[in-house]
Image (tube, rainbow, N blue to C red):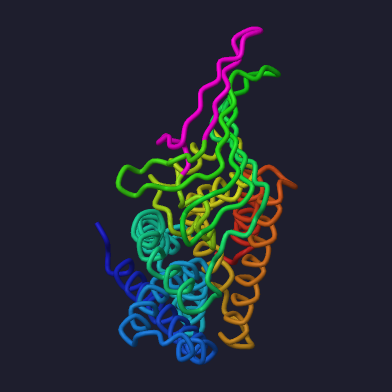
């Protein structure tokens, strides 16, 4: 049962959080629009699509900066209470320090749960539209330009493509091999491979297949052959921030698919998944830390405490970004790297908690 103190602090905390989010998102959107307005004019971007883009962009950026804004809100509200000696009055009335922190934790749990749901299921769908808009009107049109591409389709299937044309969804000079260990079981070659949208299969033209059975070679060939492969034109589409456009279910399936193929870039999507689970804990930790930092009345006023809060929040963001880079480059274990900022800042928060006057 929430008491008057809880309702009072939770209301101020959440209102301040919403105000800070609205303020920062508005500033970021205005700056982004000013920087990219010329691109929109050059690409003749429709006005309604621009509005839709910034609606999706605002949702994404609001959730992205939530750890920062929740920390700023906790520092701002607590420093105001401390500046008006309300914290001293509350503690002097017999309320324990953990009891004072409780309403902040309740508010941050609500924000953390909402953020996790948005980040895992809602925002990836809005990001599909946002990233499509950026690819269409803000970035150069994507063309798959790699040559001599080797792709692992499964545990024993390997595909070689000399060239791929994005516009026609077709490839030239392809070879599909079935290899287990050091033994080649079959080899399928074709002059050209084209995607069939009606059947979701690839059509091989001027194909030749060789099956190796001991010392025997069984050869078949023909002009056309429709076959299903564990790959589609999406593989050759733009990979621009695709990890941000996958829901949790899609992300898990994508990781499983990449691991089956033995792809090297699977670490990027694994780090994305881990990050989505660490973000709610970051919200709780930074809220706790913000309360502890700002609960002591400062002679310099609340401005110093708020400035300190900003500095600590940006240090956290820099540290988190650096740790994520280490994880994606495989310089450090992904779980350790992504969780490390939370662990360290939790330690700092606990230290400050025991140092705080109670």
* Residue at image coords 56%, 30%: 188
Instruction: Pick the quarter of the image with the C terminus.
Output: bottom right
x then y, percent, for residue 313: 60, 70
- Region rendered in magenta: 207-231
* Residue at image coords 68%, 56%: 323
Q: Does the magenta portion include 217?
A: yes
Up-down relation of residue 263 to residue 57 (above or below): above
Q: Is residue 79 left or right of residue 346?
A: left
Instruction: Pick the quarter of the image with the N terminus.
Output: bottom left
Determine the image quadrant of residue 219. top right
Q: Nearer the viewer, residue 344 or 94?
A: 344
Type of secondary structure dominating the magenta stretch: strand
Q: Is residue 338 visible?
A: yes
Up-down relation of residue 198 to residue 208 (above or below): below
Q: Is residue 232 left or right of residue 240?
A: left
Q: Does the magenta portion include 220?
A: yes
């Amino acid at each position: 049962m929430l008491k008057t103190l809880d309702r009072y602090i939770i209301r101020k905390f959440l209102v301040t959080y919403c105000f800070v989010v609205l303020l920062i998102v508005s500033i970021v959107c205005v700056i982004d629009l000013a920087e990219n307005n010329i691109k929109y004019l050059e690409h003749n971007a429709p006005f309604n699509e621009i509005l839709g883009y910034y609606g999706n962009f605002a949702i994404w950026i609001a959730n992205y900066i939530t750890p920062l804004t929740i920390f700023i809100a906790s520092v701002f509200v607590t420093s105001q209470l401390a500046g008006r000696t309300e914290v001293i009055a509350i503690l002097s009335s017999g309320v324990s320090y953990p009891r004072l922190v409780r309403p902040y934790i309740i508010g941050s749990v609500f924000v953390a749960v909402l953020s996790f749901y948005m980040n895992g299921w809602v925002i990836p769908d809005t990001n599909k539209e946002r990233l499509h808009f950026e690819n269409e009107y803000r970035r150069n049109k994507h063309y798959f330009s790699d040559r001599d591409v080797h792709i692992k389709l499964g545990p024993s299937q390997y595909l070689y493509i000399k060239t791929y044309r994005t516009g026609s969804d077709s490839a030239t000079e392809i070879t599909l091999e079935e290899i287990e260990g050091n033994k080649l079981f079959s080899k399928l070659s074709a002059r050209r491979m084209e995607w069939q949208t009606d059947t979701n299969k690839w059509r091989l033209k001027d194909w030749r297949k060789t099956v190796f059975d001991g010392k025997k070679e069984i050869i078949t060939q023909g002009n056309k052959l429709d076959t299903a492969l564990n790959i589609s034109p999406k593989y050759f589409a733009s990979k621009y921030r695709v990890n941000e456009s996958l829901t949790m279910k899609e992300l898990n399936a994508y990781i499983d698919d990449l691991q089956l193929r033995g792809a090297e870039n699977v670490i990027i999507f694994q780090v994305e998944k881990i990050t989505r689970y660490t973000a709610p804990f970051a919200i709780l930790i930074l809220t706790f830390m913000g309360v502890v930092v700002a609960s002591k009345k400062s002679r310099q006023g609340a401005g110093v405490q708020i400035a300190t809060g900003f500095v600590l929040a940006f240090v956290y963001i820099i540290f988190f970004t650096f740790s994520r880079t280490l994880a994606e480059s495989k310089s450090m274990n992904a779980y350790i790297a992504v969780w490390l900022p939370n662990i360290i800042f939790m330690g700092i928060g606990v230290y400050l908690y025991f140092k705080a006057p109670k």
